[in-house]
Structures are given as C-alpha cells and as structure tokens.
Image (spheres, rainbow, N blue to C red):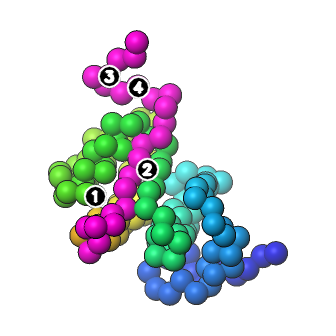
Amino acid sequence: MAHPLRSTEPRGGLADLRPFGRMVGGARVVGLGEATHSSHEFFTVKHRVFRDLVEEKGFRAFALEVPWNTGLRLDAYLMRGEGRLKQIMDEEFQGTYQWWNNAEYRDLLQWMRAYDIEHPEDPVRFVGDDGGAPVPGCTTR
C-alpha cells in the first residue's frame, strides 16, 4: 500500500513516515537505494528516512558504498570532529564515488555530527562498505 510523503526534505516533522516505521518493525538493518545517483530528492528523502530511523527506531549506523578508509575518516569526523567535512568529501569522493560529493550528503553528515555532539553517549556512526574498493596502505594475506 502506498503512503504519501509530506516532503522529501529532511527537516520538519516525521509523522508521515509512521507507515514506514511499521514496515520496518524490529528490523536491525534497512537498505535504502536510489534509482539514480545525484538526484536531489533521492538523497534528501534518504536523509529524512535515516533521521526517522535514528530518532524513532534507535538505528545508529549509516553505511555507504565507499571504501573502508573513507568510512573511517568520516566516522572520525562524526565522532570526534576530526578534519573539515568539505575537505574530507572533496578528497574521498572522487572518481566512481564523485556522485556522493554533494550538498545533500554534506547536510546529512552535518546532521549526524550535530546528533553526535548532542548524544555523545549514543552516537551515530558511519561505515564505508565497498569491499571491492582498494584501500591504500592495506594489504591482504
């Protein structure tokens, strides 16, 4: 059954996402994709849904198709404020990952950092989950 969204924008009330919350139920992992990369509405609704998952369902991790080391840099920014977000994004989101370097994901990461500052005992984490991507400086045996 379809349920209309009030908005795709991440700010504001989340009441219209209650049907989604019922669909999620007690799931521990929720996957969110997009039909196209670099589409404003797909990225902003992903931010809005993640905000709902954090605030209403207790989710505390966001994984994105980027190398593990990119995830470590972004997680250090979220957890401890290490680095400058725009610089990290400019350096890490290049080549096949360039579509992640946009205002919508920067807004999501800034929201996550603000959440972590407000909730240091229960932070939101970031994970790079592209296992096929090379990780400079790491070797496998």
Which residue in the protein does label 2 denote? 100
Which x, y percent locates residue 30? 60, 58
Q: CA distance from mark 2 to mark 4?
A: 17 Å
> Is residue 138 covered in magenta?
yes
Q: Main secondary structure of the magenta part?
A: loop
Q: Residue at x 48, y 64 (%)?
A: 59
Q: Is residue 32 visible?
A: no
Q: CA distance from mark 4 to mark 1?
A: 23 Å
Q: Secondary structure at mark 4?
A: loop
Q: Quadrant of residue 45?
A: bottom right
Q: Is residue 39 visible?
A: yes
Q: CA distance from mark 3 to mark 1?
A: 23 Å
Mark sitting on residue 30: none
Position of the C terminus, as image quadrant, is top left
Q: CA distance from mark 4 to mark 3?
A: 8 Å
Mark sitting on residue 78: 1
Which residue in the protein does label 3 denote? 138
Q: Residue at x 25, y 67 (%)?
A: 120
Which residue in the protein does label 4 denote? 134
For the record, the magenta segment spans 118-141
Q: Is residue 26 rendered to the left or right of residue 126?
A: right
Q: Secondary structure at mark 1?
A: helix
Q: Earlier in the sequence, mark 2 or mark 4?
A: 2
Which x, y percent locates residue 119? 29, 72
